């Protein structure tokens, strides 16, 4: 096989350009991940507490806090939210305490699950508000149309 000089130089350019582009791509991915982490870094989960200590059957609740002081939401700590964690052998490593008097200890994974549940709740609330605003705008348009034609 015979390749001319222009084909050889083009192949050399492709070989050297590809890693550079790939490095740029990875750099963008790292930056994007960092931005995502920075957006969620401000959110924190408080220690589990009882909503009313007098009530016997009340669930544990945690607060999702922004900036260390502003409480954004209060979520119930239930087995559905934080199911028992198992190791590779299938043994339960962590679960919510069966006794109501014992305060649950939340690890990093548990706090991430609570934050994920908060994000889902926030997304549903935003969608509901959007739908409500849409309905209000439709009703407003009908009223304006009636006023124009009256």
Image (cartoon, helix red, strand yellow):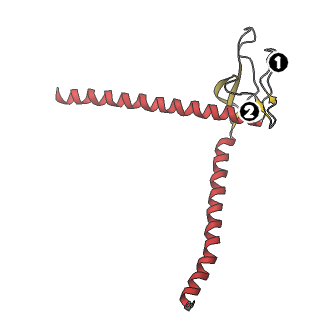
Quadrant position of the N terminus in the picture: bottom right
Residue plotted at (59% across, 80% down): 13
In the foreground, 30 or 97:
97
Q: Disc count in the image? A: 2
Which type of secondary structure does the marked residue at label 1 adopt?
A: loop
State which tag comes first along the sequence, 2 or 1. 1
Residue designated by label 2: 110
Quadrant position of the C terminus in the picture: top left
In the foreground, 45 or 1:
1
Residue plotted at (23% across, 30% down): 145
Tell me: residue 60, above or below residue 32: above
Residue plotted at (71% across, 17% down): 59
Tell me: residue 52, above or below residue 43: above
Q: Residue 138, position in %: x, y? A: 32, 30
Residue designated by label 1: 102
Which type of secondary structure does the marked residue at label 2 adopt?
A: helix
Q: Quadrant of residue 93?
A: top right
In the image, which disc is placed on residue 134? none
Q: Residue 140, position in %: x, y? A: 31, 28
In the foreground, 144 or 97:
97
Tell me: residue 150, above or below residue 31: above
Q: Residues within 10 Å of mark 1 (few under 14, many from 20)?
A: few
**What residue occupies the far front of the structure in this picture?**
1
């Amino acid at each position: 096989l015979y390749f001319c000089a222009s084909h050889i130089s083009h192949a050399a350019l492709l070989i050297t350009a590809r890693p550079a582009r790939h490095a740029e791509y990875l750099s963008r991915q790292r930056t994007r991940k960092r931005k995502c982490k920075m957006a969620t870094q401000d959110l924190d989960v408080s220690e589990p507490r009882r909503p009313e200590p007098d009530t016997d059957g009340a669930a544990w609740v945690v607060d999702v806090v922004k900036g260390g002081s502003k409480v954004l939401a209060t979520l119930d700590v239930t087995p559905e939210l934080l199911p028992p964690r198992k190791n590779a052998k299938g043994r339960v490593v962590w679960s919510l305490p069966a006794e109501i008097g014992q305060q649950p200890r939340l690890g990093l994974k548990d706090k991430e699950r609570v934050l994920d549940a908060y994000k889902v709740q926030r997304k549903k609330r935003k969608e509901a508000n959007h739908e409500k605003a849409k309905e209000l705008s439709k009703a407003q348009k009908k009223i304006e149309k009636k006023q124009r034609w009256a």
